Amino acid sequence: MKYAEGSALIEVGDTRVVCTATLEDRVPQFLKGQGKGWVTAEYGMLPRATSERNPREATKGKSGRSYEIQRLIGRALRAVVDLEALGERTVWVDCDVIQADGGTRTAAITGAFVALVEALSLLSCDDGEAGDAEGAGRAAGRELAHPIPVKDFIAATSVGIVDGELLADLSFDEDSRASVDMNVVMTGGGKLVEVQGTAEGHPFSKADLDRMLRLAKGAIDTLVSIQREVLGELAAKVGR
């Protein structure tokens, strides 16, 4: 996106999400004077992102599902941002689904992290200030004076058991047939941030849970490697 401080388009299967990150030099009222920042998210879906048209949330009001997903995205990103090093600034992350085929929340988290790092890199640039017209959206390749205030990578994926088979990154059809369906958010270092798991019809065992978490770990390792590749030189500034 031309005007955003950070942006990314993520495609996972047939799911596509546009993620942008915007820097704002203020914090919510409850954080004023505390010397630390905030990261928050908004999530939405275009009317024809799905097989049937859904009314725009600007018209009908935001659904409970959208609120739940945007809170998840915010929690996930805050888990890896050094809010004290960020200072009294807010990062607004917007995740807009342009096509949905399952896993929109996990794709949004994974793409949003890239946009977030791009935006925060502008705070450390020698040759520009965050939000300036020349610098917006072009963080990669700049020389940084200070580390980016991000402690680790973060990504997310869905896993589940479909027709007795363990699968990662479930499509809409696979998700609708899954006997167990789970979303896993994990740091690049392998630490869990959130696990959302549900059985449909029959409870699942601890052994099944362990198998799904191992599969999720492998998938998230792959996603983090792609994030690193996309971020290029900026990736080396994460976690320093």
Image (cartoon, rainbow, N blue to C red):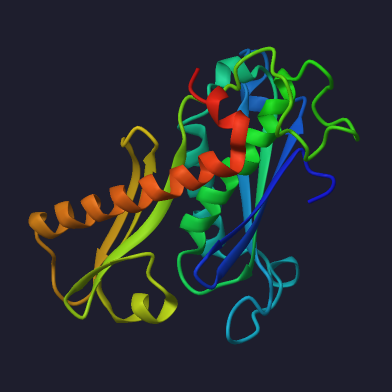
Is 104 on the left-hand or right-hand side of 39? left
Residue at x-position 72% and y-position 20%: 143
Q: Nearer the viewer, residue 7 or 74?
A: 7
* Residue at 52% in and 44% down: 227
x then y, percent, for residue 140: 70, 34
Of 146 and 39, the residue lying toward us: 146
Q: Position of residue 124 (x, y in %)?
A: 71, 18
Q: How many marks?
A: 0
What residue occupies the far right of the structure in this picture? 133
Q: Position of residue 72 (x, y in %)?
A: 48, 48
* Picture layout, residue 51 above or below residue 130: below
Residue at 53% from the left image edge and 21% from the top image edge: 82
User: Is residue 56 found left or right of 208 in the rendered image?
Assistant: right
Q: Residue furthest bottom?
A: 52
Q: Nearer the viewer, residue 202 or 131?
A: 131
Q: Is residue 134 left or right of residue 12?
A: right
Q: Is residue 39 visible?
A: no
Q: Is residue 20 above or below residue 38?
A: below
x then y, percent, for residue 193: 36, 39
Is any atom of residue 166 visible in this view? yes
* Quadrant of residue 197 within the rendered picture: bottom left
Reply above or below: 106 against 117.
Answer: below
Is residue 54 placed above or below 144 in the rendered structure?
below
